[in-house]
Amino acid sequence: MRAGLLQLVFIAVGLGLGLVVPEFTRGPVLPSRPVAEMLLATGFGVLGAATVIFSVLFLVVQWAATTFTPRLTLFRDAPIVWRTFAFAVGLTVFCATAALTIANRDEVSVVVPISAGVLLLLLLTLLRTLLLKAVAAIQLAPVLGSITERGRHNLDVLYTSGPGGTRGPGDAQGPRGPAGPGGPRSAVCWPKAAAVLQRVDVDLLAGAARAANAVVVLRVTPGTTLQHGTTVAEVYDGELPGSAVLRGLETGAERVFDQDPGLAFRLLADIALRALSPAVNDPATAVQALDAMEDLLRRPARARSREVADRAGVLRVVVPLPAWEDFLRTALDDVIPAARNSPSVLIRLRALLEDLLAAGHDRGQALLTRRLAWVDEELGARFSRLRDALEQERRDEG
């Protein structure tokens, strides 16, 4: 929707400029006929930029899907793609409108061709930025860096408080829980076909809950696939219709980064798994993906829920959050068995788990210990001499 709206805005701006700019009469003037021909040639020539944009988009999306993972949509959803396309369409509209406006005039201000030239230079700048973005989107290190950056941002935003959860605005002491005892007043089920929960509009839900003097407790997290009939929320204290709750849930066909901290771990695990497949057999790529995983796993994720209160400090919305243990399972449980024939990846997995244990992470010590034993078992079963050499090196260093 935002991409389509942006195109409409640029079309309207191009139309307005095409009507207004030819009205300037100050300064040097030029014959209108060659200027009109130049504008038409520029406008129709700019349409070729749209072909370039969609060609690059198709190639990069196909490359990312086959090389990394089909769930990687960073370039497809990049704002630069749709902004460049919208600017090209707006420039075409401007050139065509300005050419028609000056068609019956004898002279036109030099401002008109200069404006078209400046806009054309801006389009070339956007195209250059787009191509650089496309080159980065097909290289491993920039892709891993972008995924890690987005995952780190989500963890920092969603897990900023302690075990009590995220505090709402205007609540210095922490939000208060549901006022009434007992179970929920009502449960809200998903009435449509299966869809992925992408975002939760907590402000909209908090406003509706405040108006009904209720508390909305979601039972699903962003990134979850909602099946028909699934309980998505429970309403406590007040009476709030299910339609008001469903309006605060934005769904789609696939997961997005906005409020889904687990997506970064899923994408990194997918990249590692594809690199370890017999068809690719690229363990170095899997090691780089594990480097990015460790960077995210080292970050704390203590809060179990995101709690939003109103200005009076009364709890209105509770959104569950994935636990750190969920991130660990997503990151490693598929990669460990896939790495059984790759000694370098097994060694990196062992180092990752030992580093997390040594860092004294406040959760999941038992999970880390069991996975470390699993990696040692795989390493000893297939590369016993390598494991013995590593143990001897460790004793020598100690």
Image (cartoon, helix red, strand yellow):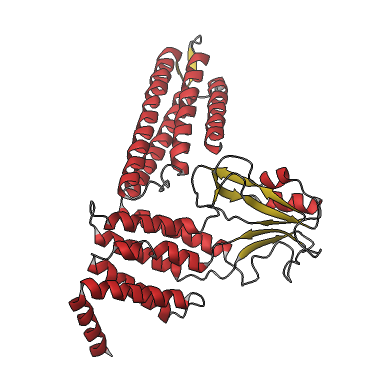
Camera sees residue 28: no
Q: Quadrant of the C terminus?
A: bottom left
Query: In the image, 273: left or right of 318?
Result: left
Q: Which residue is at the front of the view, 180 or 117?
A: 180
Residue found 58% across the figure and 56% down from its top: 221
Residue found 55% across the figure and 38% down from its top: 2
Q: Quadrant of the N terminus?
A: top right
Residue found 44% across the figure and 74% down from its top: 367
Tally the numbered discs. Answer: 0
Q: Quadrant of residue 390?
A: bottom left
Q: Is residue 32 above or below residue 324?
A: above
Q: Position of residue 265 (x, y in %)?
A: 43, 60
Camera sees residue 187: yes
Q: Which residue is at the front of the view, 316 or 179?
A: 179
Q: Which residue is farthest top?
A: 104
Residue found 63% across the figure and 47% down from its top: 249
Q: Position of residue 93 (x, y in %)?
A: 49, 23
Q: Position of residue 71 (x, y in %)?
A: 41, 48
Q: Is residue 67 above or below residue 307?
A: above
Query: In the image, 62: left or right of 253?
Result: left
Query: In the image, 119: left or right of 166?
Result: left
Q: Position of residue 260 (x, y in %)?
A: 52, 55
Q: Which residue is at the front of the view, 71 or 130?
A: 71
